[in-house]
Image: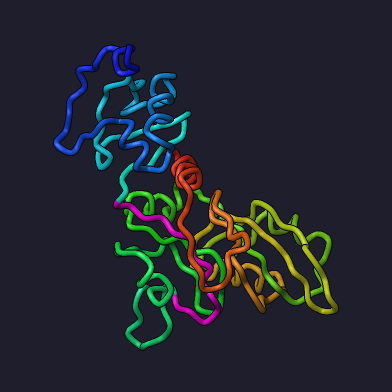
Amino acid sequence: MRRDDRAPKTDAPVFEGAERLQKVLAAAGVGSRRACEDLIFRRRVTVNGKVAQLGDRADPTRDVIFVDGERLQADTRLVYLALNKPRGVVSTMADERGRTALSDFVGHRVEQRVYHVGRLDADSEGLLLLTNDGNLAHRLTHPSYGVSKTYLCEVAGPIPRNLGKRLAAGIELEDGPVTVDSFKVVDTLGKTAQVELTLHEGRKHIVRRLLAEVGHPVARLVRTSIGPIRLGDLRAGRTRRLTNAEVAALFKAVGD
C-alpha cells in the first residue's frame, strides 16, 4: 500500500496556487519530500488550524502552516535577514545625502526588495532585521506586541550598585517614563564600564537618553538581540538569512 492511501483525502478548498503539502514543506526547507510525508502521516502538520493528511494540498502564499506547533513561513518569496549594522551607517535603504546606507550591504545579495525593521541611529551598531514580510515587520515594531531588545553599551563609570533597581523602577524622561526588563554590569575598566540592558521600548534614542538621564552617557552602543534573534558572531557589515526555526520564533514572539 502506498503511503498516500493510508489516509482519506480531505474536502478542503483547493486554491489556484495549491501544491502537494509535502512539496510545499520541502521547498520551505523542512526536509526531503519523503521526510515531509512522514511528518504529515504522524499528524505533526496543521494547515489553517486543521491536522493535515497525506494527499492534502496547500497554497504557500495563503495558508497558515504549523509543523510541531511552530509556524512555518512556506512562501519562498519572503526574505528574512539579520544584518550587523556598522557604526556610521544610516538606517535607511537609500540616503539622499549619499551616506552609506543599508542597501550597500544587502542590495546585491538578495533579489527581493527588503525593508529594515526598526532603526539604529548612525552612531549605533549591531543587529537589524530586514524583510519583505510587511505583516511581521509591523508586529515586531508595534509597541503593543512588546518585543524585547538587548543592548551592550560602553558608558561612563563607575556604576553604582543600585542602578539596576532604579532602572527597573522606572526613569522619567521628557516623553514619559521608561523601565528596563534587565540590567547588569558586564565589565569595568577604569572610568569606563560595559553594561547590558533589555527593554521593550522603541522610542527614538531611548537607550542613550535613558542612560544619560541617570548620569552614564553612552560612548558606544551595540544591539545584540531582537526578541529571539541574536547577533552572535555575525561580523560588522555582514548579513545572514534567518533559519526556519528563527522565523518561527519571531512569529511566536508576536503571538502568531
Query: Residue furthest toward the front?
Result: 1
Residue 164 to residue 228: above or below: below
Q: Nearer the viewer, residue 43 or 161?
A: 43
User: Which residues are the magenta region?
Assistant: 77-90
Residue 81 belongs to magenta span: yes
Q: Residue at the spot x=43%, y=56% of the render?
A: 141
Residue 61 to residue 55: above or below: below
Q: Quadrant of residue 214?
A: bottom right
Q: Position of residue 128 (x, y in %)?
A: 49, 64
Q: Is residue 182 left or right of residue 66?
A: right
Residue 250 belongs to magenta span: no
Quarter of the image with the N terminus is top left
Q: Position of residue 192 (x, y in %)?
A: 78, 77
Q: Is residue 48 left or right of residue 177?
A: left
Q: Residue at the spot x=56%, y=52% of the render?
A: 148
Q: Position of residue 175 (x, y in %)?
A: 51, 66
Q: Residue at the spot x=32%, y=48% of the render?
A: 76
